[in-house]
Image: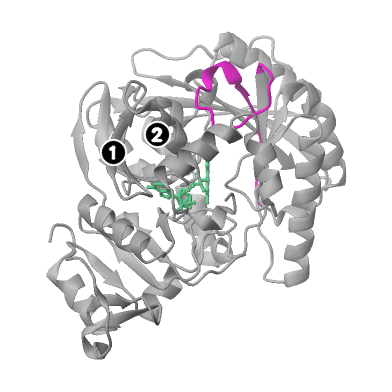
Amino acid sequence: MKNASRRQVLQGAIASAIIIGFNPAMRSWVTSASAASEFESLPPLDGILYTDSATRNAAADDFGHLVRRYPSAVLKPGSVEDIVRIVRFARSHKLKVAARGQAHSTYGQPLIEAGIVIDMSSLDTIHTMNAEGAEVDAGVLWSQLLLASLERQLTPPVLTDYIELSVGGTLAVGGIGGRSHRYGVQVDNVLSLQVVTGAGNLETCSRSQNRDLFEAVLAGLGQCGIIVRATVRLIPSAQNSRVFLLFYNDLAALTHDQRWLIAQKRFDYVEGQVVPDASGGWRYMLEAASFYTPPDEPDNSSLLAGLSYTQGTQQIEDKSYFDFANRLAPTVAFLKESGVWFYPHPWLDLFVPATAVDRFVGEIVSDLTLADTGQGPVLLYPVPTDRLRLPLFRVPDEAVVFLFAILRTAPPDASAIAKMLADNRTFFERNRDTGGYRYPIDAVPFSQADWRQHFYPVWGRLVSAKRRYDPDNLLTPSQGIF
Ligand SMILES: Cc1cc2nc3c(=O)[nH]c(=O)nc-3n(C[C@H](O)[C@H](O)[C@H](O)COP(=O)(O)OP(=O)(O)OC[C@H]3O[C@@H](n4cnc5c(N)ncnc54)[C@H](O)[C@@H]3O)c2cc1C
C-alpha cells in the first residue's frame, strides 16, 4: 500500500466493510459481510474501493451543482496499477468509469451514474523536476506544482486563473489563462503522458511516441484514457508581477487594444473583463501584467503608451509572482465563508471569432443584468490561434479568438437556473452560427449531434481513437459524446 494510510484503510473498512468482489448477476458489490452469493473477486488493490453512501454522495456532485449522478463505487487509488486493475475489472463487468480531478466542472462532466469514479486526488506526487519540465501525478494541483517549481525559479508557462485545479483535470479540457497569447493552452505545454486507456493498458505517449493517443487524450474530455502522469513544460520564472487594470467605456476600444497588445507581446499576461459600472450598466477592464525580477523593473509609460483606456482610471499594483498566480485565493475564501461558493454555477464559456466579437458580446452585454450573472465575473480576452496545436481543443478558424465567459452564480432556485441554462444554449447557438465554439467545461445542454459538429472535422479521428483505446465505451460517459 503506497499512499493510503492505515487510518484510511480502517476508515474504509468501518464505513463499508471491505469490498471483495462484484456480483455480475445482481450488478452489485459484494462485501466481506455479504459474501453468500457467487461473485467475481476484486483484484488486490494498493488503495481502497469505497461503496459507502458518504463517499459516493461526495462524488455525486461537482462545482456546478446542477447535475447529480450517484456512482456505485469510488476508487481512491494507491498506485497507477490500481487504475489499470480497476479499469480492466470494470471492462469485464461492463461498468462505466470516470476520473475525478477536483470536480471543478460545472455540468456533471466528472460524474457517473452507477459506475466507478476514480478519485485522482490520492495520486499527487511530483516525481521529478528539472529546467525543462516536471513529471507529476495527474492528481497534483497546479498550485502545488507552482510552489515546488518556484523554489527553482521555474513556472508552468500557462496557469489557469484558479490554480487549485488538478493537472489531469485541466489537461483533459485544455487549460487557458492570461499567458495563452504567448504559450498556447496548458495542453500545448505537455512533453509526455502516461495514460490508462479504456482497454485497460498503461501507455506512454508524446508527440513522437503514440502520437494518436497523445492527441486523443489532451483536451480529449476523458474519452480515450485516464491521464495518470504528465511531464509538463517549465520555463524560467520572474519573481514579481506588475499588474495593470485599465478601464474602458467602449467595448471595441478594449478589444482593439487587447489585440494590439498581444500582437506586440508587450505584456506577459493579458486578460480582460466586463465589469459593472456605478450606474448599473457595464464597462470594460483590461487586465495585463508584466513579470520582472529586481533590479530590473517594467517601464510603465512604455507599457501603457498608445492605449485608449479612460485616462486616470488605471490601477497599478506590484505583487510577487506567486501572489499574482494565486490572486483568486482571497475571493474564494470569502465566497466559501459566505456560502456563495457552494451555490449552483451555470457557467457559459465560449470562443468567439475576433471578427464577430464586438457585435456578439455587445448584444449580449446590452441586455445583461447582475441577476443574469449572479455577480459572477464576465471574462473577455484574446488568444492567437497559431499557438494552439492540439486537434481536440476546438476554437474558431481565425487568427485571433476571444474567450467570452459568463461565470454565473445562481440562487438555489430551479426557475432561475433553468433561465440561465436556456440563455447559455441561446448564446452558444448564436456564437456557433458565426463560427464560434464552446469551451466544454461549462453548462450548455448538448446533444450527440452538437458534439459531432463541435469536433468536425476531427470527429472521425476521435471516433477511431475511441474505438481503438476505449473499445467498450467505458470512459467518462457524462460528457454525452458517445
Ligand atoms: C473557479 C474556477 C476557475 C477556473 N478557471 C479556469 C481558467 O482560468 N482556465 C481554464 O481553462 N479553466 C478554468 N476552470 C475550469 C477548469 O479548468 C475545468 O473545469 C477543469 O476540468 C477542472 O479541473 P478538475 O481537476 O476539477 O477536473 P474535473 O472537473 O474533476 O474533471 C474534468 C473532466 O476531465 C475528466 N478528468 C479528470 N481528471 C482526469 C484525468 N486524470 N484523466 C482523464 N480525464 C480526467 C473528468 O472525468 C471530467 O470529464 C475553472 C474552474 C473553476 C471552478
Residue at 81 percent across and 27 percent down: it is 358
Q: Where is residue 122 in the image (x, y as percent from the top left)?
A: 27, 57
Residue at 44 percent across and 26 percent down: it is 188
Q: Residues within 10 Å of mark 1 (few under 14, many from 20)?
A: some
> What amino acid is labelled 2 in the image?
Leu
Q: How many marks?
A: 2
Report if residue 178 is visible in the image. Answer: yes
Answer whether residue 396 is magenta in the image.
Answer: yes
State which tag comes first along the sequence, 1 or 2.
1
Answer whether residue 310 is magenta in the image.
Answer: no
Residue at 38 percent across and 50 percent down: it is 198
Callout 2: SS:
helix
The answer to whether marks 1 and 2 mark residues whose Cβ atoms lie closer than 8 Å is yes
Q: Position of residue 6 (x, y in %)?
A: 13, 70
Is residue 459 found left or right of 294 in the rendered image? Answer: right
Q: Mark 2 points at which residue?
A: 213
- Position above or below: 118 against 20: above
Residue at 46 percent across and 35 percent down: it is 216
Span highlighted in magenta in the image: 376-399
Q: Is mark 2 within 8 Å of ligand 1?
A: no
Between residues 267 and 56, which one lies in front from this camera angle? 56
Callout 1: SS:
strand
Report if residue 350 is visible in the image. Answer: no
> What amino acid is labelled 1 in the image?
Glu
Is residue 440 found left or right of 6 in the rendered image? Answer: right
Q: Mark 1 points at which residue?
A: 203
Q: Is mark 1 within 8 Å of ligand 1?
A: no
- Position above or below: 352 against 104: above
User: CA gap, disc 1 to disc 2?
Assistant: 9 Å
